Every structure is written in structure tokens, then in C-alpha cells.
Image (cartoon, coloured by chain):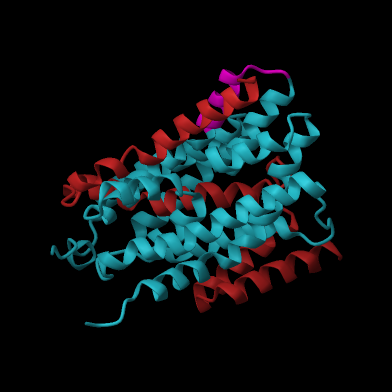
Chain colours: A red, B cyan
Amino acid sequence: MSSAWLAIVLAAAGTFAMRAAFLVVAHRLADVPMPVQRVLRQIPPAALAAIVVPDLLRPRQHLDLWQPELAAGVIAALVIWRTRSTALTLVVGMAVLVGLRHV
Amino acid sequence: MSASTVPDDLRAGARAVAPMLVGVVPFGLVAGATPVAHGLGGGVAVGFSVIVFAGASQLAAIDVLGSGGSPFIAAVAAWTINLRLLLYSASLAPHLARERLRTRVWVAYLLTDQAYAVCISRWGPDDNPRRRVPYFLGAALVLWVSWQLSTIAGVLIGATVPEDVPLEFAVPLVFLVLLVPAITGRPAAIAAAIGGIAAVVGAEAGAGKLSLMVGAVSGIVAGTLAELRWPPATSDVAPEPSG
């Protein structure tokens, strides 16, 4: 087996283990104790913010608070907060970014 | 007998992730083109996409291999980036407690940022647990097929994405669309704020792809402490009705 295929098998095995870790024992998780529920509830906002915020605050891999991505992101956040419309948010966010890049 | 809701749920899941394909397809093209550019061949590119099926980690492993690193180091690079999948697995598991093991194993293989994000924003105390897996599969299969097809396209034609259209910006926008409604109160707002700030600090400190995990864990700790300090109204934490 070539080293690339060995890397694929190793990477896939570990990745699957992480994906499956809790799902394979989910049948024992029907009644999650309240303290654990409290922790699990934090995962969506914390993980989603950890994905989004660096993309907006350091779009070119360094911290920069004066750039079009952050401005477009803030406006898009207001649009989704007020309208809950995915399509409108994407259109407005993209349009603001393109517009600001050309001024 | 009422008509099956499965087709409706498959379609609803597919519709929910459709806007994300704007980010997935160019990324898949890169995942297909990069191994070819490194001389690893198209088979390896497709192998990564089908067997590993986790975009950022594929590119990290390919980068290690392309610069002459060992397969073990390449795998460690991939694992590091994919640690966040542990959090998604923990977060989704209680919602799928009544599913068969075989179903949960398929869910695990297909689990991605996008599929997690659309499902966790929909599943809660009020939805029908039986309709969750079809919704997940509708989303996850659209992502899987798009990922494989765009990988193959990347192998065949290379990654040629127009530069003046900032398509890559669709990715943070789509996650933003899911983040904002997830902020349901003060603890969630604190989890998001600390999660985002810690991820930026981690990245600035050179944590690389691990900064996502740094941010997520910091945000989870902060949100948990905030909930202990400001407990939510009991109606918000009503347990899922059993049965």
C-alpha cells in the first residue's frame, strides 16, 4: 500500500471514531442528566461562532477590524436576525462585500 | 395509515443545505485538484473524499503528504482538525437515542459541519423524533454527492474558480444564518461570544486549524458557567416527551 493510501486509512479511521464516539452509544443517552444537557446546549452557539467569527475578523489570516468581510458579516447578521431569511442574507451579504471591495 | 413523511423530510433537509453548496463545490474542486497537483493522482483524491469525507482535514493531510511527510503525520493533521466532530457527535446523539445502531453508524459516516448545523437548529423538544433521520439524510446525501462530484470535477479539470466573485464568503454567511437563531438567551450569547473570540485568539497565537476546537471548548465552558449563574426559565429546558 502506498503511503498516501495508508494516510487515507489512518485519517479515515480516526475521523470515523470521532464522528461515531457518541452516536454509537446514543441508545443510552435518551435521558441525559440535566448537568450534561446544560453542557450540550452550549455546543451549537460555541461551535458555530468558532467557525464564523475567525472568517469575519481575520479573512486574510491576520486580525483586521477594518475590512469589507467584517462589515458585510455584521450587516448579514442583522438581516438574518430581523428576517430569518437565508436567501436574503446571502444576497445582501455578498452584495455588500462586492460593493465594498469596489469602493 | 397516513402518507409517509419521509420524502417530505428528505426534501426539507436537502433544501436546508442547498445554499451551502455554494461553498462546498469550490472546496470540493480544490480537494480534487490539490492531490493531482502534488502528484498523488486522482485515485488518492477520490479516496480521500469518499473514505475520509471531511474537507479541511483532507487538504491538511494532502499538504503533509505533498511536502514529503509521513502518512502518520498526515493522519494526525487530519485528526486534529476533525476533533470538532466529537462535539457534533455528542450534541446530536441524544436526539437519535431511539434509532437503530446501523442507522446511527451511517449518520456518523455522513456527519459534517453543514449537516450538523442544519439539524441541530431544527431538532428540539417540539419536533417528531421519527422525522429526524430522513431530514439528516436529505441534507447529508446532497452534501455527500456534491462533494464527490466536485472532487471528481477537480481531478479532471482542476480548480478554476472565478476570483472576482467572492464565493468563498458564502461559507461564513451560511454558518452565520445558523448561528444567529442559535443565540436563544444570555448563556448562548456568552457561549458564542467567548467561542468566537477564543477561536480568533487561538488562530492569532498560531493554533492553526486547532483554533476552532479552542474556541468551541472555551465557548462551551463559558456558556455552561453562564447558565449556572443565570438559569433559564424552566419552560426552556423541558425534557423531550418520551414515547
Q: Residue A63: horizontal and vertical position, in percent?
A: 68, 42
Q: Quadrant of the N terminus of chain B?
A: bottom left
Position of residue B210 in the picture relative to residue A18 (left or right)? right
Extreme residue in the bottom direction: B2
Q: Residue B14: horizontal and vertical position, in percent?
A: 50, 67
Q: Quadrant of the C terminus of chain B?
A: bottom left
Question: Which is nearer the eye, A46 or B5?
Answer: B5
Q: Residue B215: horizontal and vertical position, in percent?
A: 48, 41
Q: Residue A30: horizontal and vertical position, in percent?
A: 18, 52
Please report the residue visible at 68 percent of the width from the left and 48 percent of the height from the top: B151
Q: Is residue A49 above or below residue B235?
A: above
Residue B72 quadrant: top right
Q: Is residue B86 above or below residue A13?
A: below
Please report the residue visible at 19 percent of the width from the left and 49 percent of the height from the top: A32
- Looking at the rendering, the stretch of residues picked out in magenta corresponds to B68-80
Question: Which is nearer the eye, A95 or A70?
Answer: A95
Determine the main secondary structure of the stretch shown in magenta: helix
Please report the residue visible at 51 percent of the width from the left and 77 percent of the height from the top: A82
Please report the residue visible at 58 percent of the width from the left and 35 percent of the height from the top: B209
